[in-house]
Image (cartoon, coloured by chain):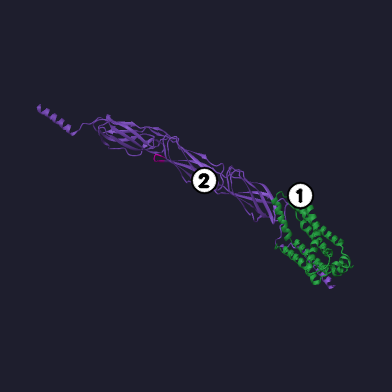
Amino acid sequence: MKDLKFLVLALCAALALVSPITAAPADITVVSSSLDPQVMMSGDTGTLTIVIQNNGAEPVAIQSARLYGKGVVPTTDPYLSVGEIGGGNTKTFTFTIRADGGEGTFYPTFVLDFREGGSLRHPVAIQVEDTPLSISMVEKPDAFSEGRTAGITVMVGNPRPNAASGVQVVPEGTGFSVTPTTGFIGGLEPDASGSVTFNLAPETETDVTFRVVWRNGINTHTTDLVLPVTFGEDKKRANPVITNVEVTPITGGYRIVGDVMNAGLESARAVMITPGSPAVPIDPFRVYVVGTLDPDDISSFEVTFRADAGVDEVPLFVEYRDDDGNLYTSTTPVGLGGGTVMTPVKEGGSGGFPVLGVVLVILIALGVAGAIYHSWKRT
Amino acid sequence: METGFLQVLLNPARFFEARIRDEPSLKVPALIALICGLIGAVSALIMADVTTAMLPAEMGGLGTLMVVFSTAVAFVGGFLAWIIYGFIFHIISMVFKGQGSLNRTLEVTGYGLIPQVFGGIIGSIFSYYLLSGLTVPAMSSAEEIAAFSEYLVTVLTTDPLAQVAGIVSILFLIWSANIWIFGMKYARNLSTRDATLTVGIPVGIYVIYLIITLIGWL
């Protein structure tokens, strides 16, 4: 009997030496879980991080950790051999997940299997929402003109519940040039917005696609806004109008004086006035350079030209440029008044010398010479 | 025919030789100067008509005044030319110790203006043809009037018809000078050489001036 008691004590002592004291699985809790991005979109890949803590004083042996569920599925392998977690310690598990189930809130389950049996199940709420960033046209011209640079402002808003990063706007298409080639906005917090302005110079009528590119976590998304570019009359452009025209015959031609007024809403730069065919500009005012005409400004001008007989109307060309240097031309016909024609002097007198006059001069010269000769002959 | 106008033109020596025997009379010479003045007035009228047409309607009164003034000046100009020529010839002839009254000088000078009558008529016809083909535009500003006046001057100096008229007037002036030579010879009792110098110097200078003007050097 005494030997039996000793044997039991020895066994207990051996057990005590061989296996330490183990905490219960109830001491393990999930203290936090985080998802990047915070709100996923369909098809997005995200990173789910789960932190557990051993609230007990003794270590807990964990066999495996895994995540499973529908709609949001893990794309990485489970943790098959985790090991022990000491008392008071924390341990982090990271899973890569993919949203395959469309929009909604999904609850994939985080499962911890303990080595001593039993397990911990913790559902994690994951929100999937497909709302994209919004893009809108804030400012654009009433009409486009070929080669004329137009300012276009695009605003990007974030109606999503989480922040978007790396937001940029890229104009795409052909038949135009644009600066900047990419507009960078950066991060957009929920309900925030950012704007970017482009200087667009169309060469042909075309469609310009403003593509908003942003990232939701590591996932890149795009949203497009198409701007049809059609040429038309710019309602604000400069409009030089010629008035108060007076046509005066001068030696060998005509002089036109008048006023040119900018009836448009934008400045006309490098305004030049010149007579067009069939008129041939002559000195001293072949071209009259007015310079810049601001809206409602008026300036006088003067041009000189010659025109063949029978020409009763000549065009006056007004050339001007806008702020971007694009050239515009307008034409105003000016009547010469018919009866106001002053016959140009024939150059060198060739072809217009009166033969009858020459004959008369010769006859008179002969007559005078004869008379003088006769008078001296008689003395 | 000894005192006829044809005699003056074709045989002035005989005409003045006969005329010198009578007392000087300025009636006929004055009549000739009057005719010259009238012809000049007609020319001035043609020119004034163009000038008046340039003026705006509200300046019509000024235009009428210009017509009257220029016609009067041209009319008086006939007499002035006669007297000026006479005085110049008389003064120059003094250098050659010419003898004879101023009235006699004026008388022969007046007869010498007869070719100027023909020259004036032909010149007026030329002026008419020259200016009648010109349509005068309506003008409202001084700049326009100045521009047209400039054009008018250009026409009158460069047009072939105007140059022909200038040559014609020179020819008739030479004819007058020929008559004046013989007139001064008898009126101031000069030698032919002195009479030629008396008339030739001032007329020659004037002819040279006219030629220079025609060529366009002035």
Q: Which residue is mark 2?
A: A200
Please name the color used to draw chain B.
green
The answer, for residue B83, to whether it is visible in the render is yes
Q: Which residue is mark 1?
A: B62
Could you tell me which quadrant the C terminus of chain B lies in?
Answer: bottom right
**Helix, strand or loop at mark 2:** strand
Give the mark toward the camera: 1 or 2.
1
For the residues labelled 1 and 2, the Cα–Cα distance comes to 65 Å
In-image side of A129 versus B159 (left or right): left
Q: Do the residues indicated by labels 1 and 2 lie within the same chain of the protein?
A: no
Crowd around label 2: few <14 · some 14–19 · many ≥20 (10 Å): many
Amino acid, disc 1: Leu
Residue B147 in the image: above or below residue A107: below
In-image side of A253 versus B197 (left or right): left
**Chain label for disc 1:** B
Magenta-colored segment: predominant secondary structure: strand
What segment carries the magenta color? A215-219
Please name whichever residue, A85 or A140, is drawn nearer the observer in this view of the structure: A140
- Magenta span includes A293: no
**Chain label for disc 2:** A
Please name whichever residue, B189 or B153, is drawn nearer the observer in this view of the structure: B189
Please name whichever residue, A101 or A88, is drawn nearer the observer in this view of the structure: A88
Q: Percent x, y for residue B101?
A: 84, 65
In-image side of A374 versus A97 (left or right): right
